[in-house]
Image (cartoon, helix red, strand yellow):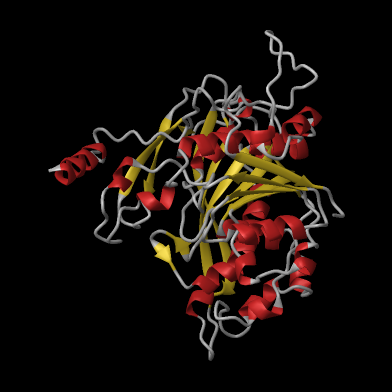
Amino acid sequence: MTKYLLAAWAALLASPALAENRIDLVRPDAPELAAHGDHVVGVTTMRFTREGVPDVARATEEEVPEYDREITVEVWYPAAQGTEPGGSYTALLRDGVTEVQLQGRAARDAEPVAEGAFPLVIVSHGYPGNRFLMSHLAENIATKGYVVASVDHPDSTYDDMGAFGSTLVNRPRDQAFVLDRMADLDDSIGAITDGDTAAVIGYSMGGYGALIFSGAGLTEDFRSSRYAPPQELLEINAMGAKTMADLPDDRVKAVVAIGPWGRNRDAWDAEGLSEIDTPLMLIAGGVDDVSGYDAIRSIFEETSGTERHLLTFDDANHNAAAPMPAPDESWEVSETLGYAPFDHYADAVWDTTRMNNVTQHFVTAFLDLHLKGDEAKADYLDLVPNSADAVWDRAEDGTPNEGDSYWAGFPNRTAKGLRFETLPAGE
């Protein structure tokens, strides 16, 4: 009887009439910088074309055809005063078939704010994923004065899962291309976009791409591994190749890589990772079994060319931080997948909204520091490494006493299950 009641309850939750699927929730116990900013936000969909690129997904040992790579981008931006906040997004679930409605704060196709110069942030999903997977983060940071472009990567979305080799080749190139196109916009959104001041945020394979885009070329062993596409197409991202030397972009002032895949398969070594000189924040689940937590720690230790941070959610798996809360419809078993897509979004231990809020807090501090020069935000990144060791010692008015070492921005009793480590350039 119990299993039938549970099935009925799941079906009820998944009913379109009841599904709200909010991506903009901020819990009452969220850290300070997770709060939405002062800007009402607009959102619009853009499409760009990379013309005449190798069609990696259809390449053979005999032929590498070329094609035009159509890239869809969701763009969030500060909207004009008086814009009514709120709107919905139509997105696909992990099964690539089921449409769901997501609810957020952004107003569809709203007029951009009249003036301003807002830094540009590129957001890049995993394999598979889509441009809405990290919409909670994109929308949140847009409210704080950023233009955010979240990419649908062809051959890598829920309804377009091509050969994995295409993602290995194209991911950093897509990121660089979208940055160029966004920086060159000549419309009303382009008028408020500071394309010379940018950041890249990538999850899983998006993190893989962001590290390559930052200068970490691939090892010879990885380029000849079973993952590599035919005809040495992966050589474009090879350590030491001219095509790699030309890829890093001085406009990118900060990189956030969440659960980056690759070091667990020796895609890089210490020499290649040391080429990164852009400030880096890594975010990971402490038991990530997809990208490998130990491998992510190796990235943290080996990116010695820059100051870098590692935020760890203890006991979280690969879904730490990045995915939006699981849509209600994902609780039902998918006929296409044979299982409930819920597992693609949720973690077995951590509440997703909690992880989203913690991530929004740290990413806000990191971007504000490096893209806006807000030195006060450095305090939010100068922490006792293990939250369990942080001591709350404050006066009644909240002023820290001499013995206080609690994490900046976290309410009392809420900095739990987290680690935040920092290494300076040169170490």
Residue at (26, 37) in percent of width and height:
13
Instruction: Single out the residue that lies furthest toward the left.
Output: 1
Residue 101 locus on image (x, y percent)? 35, 40
Residue at (72, 55) in percent of width and height:
300
Is 379 left, or right, of 262 in this rendering? Answer: right
User: In the figure, 296 relative to 17: above or below?
Assistant: below
Camera-nearest residue between 366 and 308: 308
User: In the figure, 11 relative to 299: above or below?
Assistant: above
Camera-nearest residue between 44 and 176: 176
Residue 422 locus on image (x, y percent)? 76, 45
Residue 67 in view of the camera? no
Instruction: Single out the residue that lies furthest toward the top.
Output: 396
Instruction: Single out the residue that lies furthest toward the bottom.
Output: 62
Residue 88 locus on image (x, y percent)? 39, 35
Camera-nearest residue between 198 and 305: 305
Is 376 left, or right, of 167 in this rendering? Answer: right
- Quarter holding residue 180: bottom right
User: In the figure, 381 relative to 49: above or below?
Assistant: above
